[in-house]
Amino acid sequence: DTGVSQDPRHKITKRGQNVTFRCDPISEHNRLYWYRQTLGQGPEFLTYFQNEAQLEKSRLLSDRFSAERPKGSFSTLEIQRTEQGDSAMYLCASSPQSQLAKNIQYFGAGTRLSVL
Amino acid sequence: RKEVEQDPGPFNVPEGATVAFNCTYSNSASQSFFWYRQDCRKEPKLLMSVYSSGNEDGRFTAQLNRASQYISLLIRDSKLSDSATYLCAAPYSSASKIIFGSGTRLSIRP
């Protein structure tokens, strides 16, 4: 499978626990994006990377959220001290250099987080 | 005003009908626009991109109206398999960031 891969697909955690999600973009895609989606809403932008540099973070991203892309390939999104309001689908997308000016993004299947 | 706004629907139309959705955007400098399709509990998948006045792909036509700042999606001869949520997206201030609308739900009935 050469698409965007996300792991795990589902995560159930108790409030206050830390969780980490992983995203493997399409090979050679230099831009990687994280979104959050709740029921009945479109994906909300969280942050994006160009190679290993995190270039933009949404104001939605509280200090409990951190994302990394240390080698410019896969990325991780960590949520510390989870709250029930963090329950959502976390989507990762990547974009190739050749499509840079056109902003076409390809999405992974997402990680569904449930905070109890 | 939200950056990207869509009519949430749901649109419930019979198979074979023609249906159209509109999406308005606030950033007048946007140059590229996208329609994504999202099935229940699945990821969004790119349906069409629009860079000029419009784009057509089979039964699907997307049109851009820059003066009024909206894009539309027209589906002709609708199929049961067209039932999904259709998301509109447009670039925000930085060219690399796109903003999604809340989606329009479409249900095709036999």
Image (tube, rainbow, N blue to C red):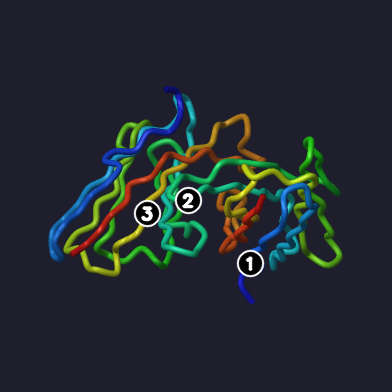
Mark 2 and mark 3 in contact? Answer it, CB < 8 Å: no
Quarter the C terminus of chain A occupies: bottom left
What kind of residue is marked 1? Gly
Q: Distance between the residues labelled 2 and 1?
A: 15 Å
Which disc is residue B59 wearing?
A: none
- Report x, y in % for residue B70: 77, 62
Read off the residue under disc 2: B40
Read off the residue under disc 3: A89
Q: Mark 1 lies on which chain?
A: B
Side of B33 relative to A61 (left or right): right
Q: In front of the other: label 2 or label 3? A: 2
Query: Do circles 3 and 1 both sit on a common chain?
Result: no
Return the residue nearer the eye: B76 or B24.
B76
Read off the residue under disc 1: B9
Q: Distance between the residues labelled 2 and 3?
A: 12 Å
- Report x, y in % for residue A80: 19, 59
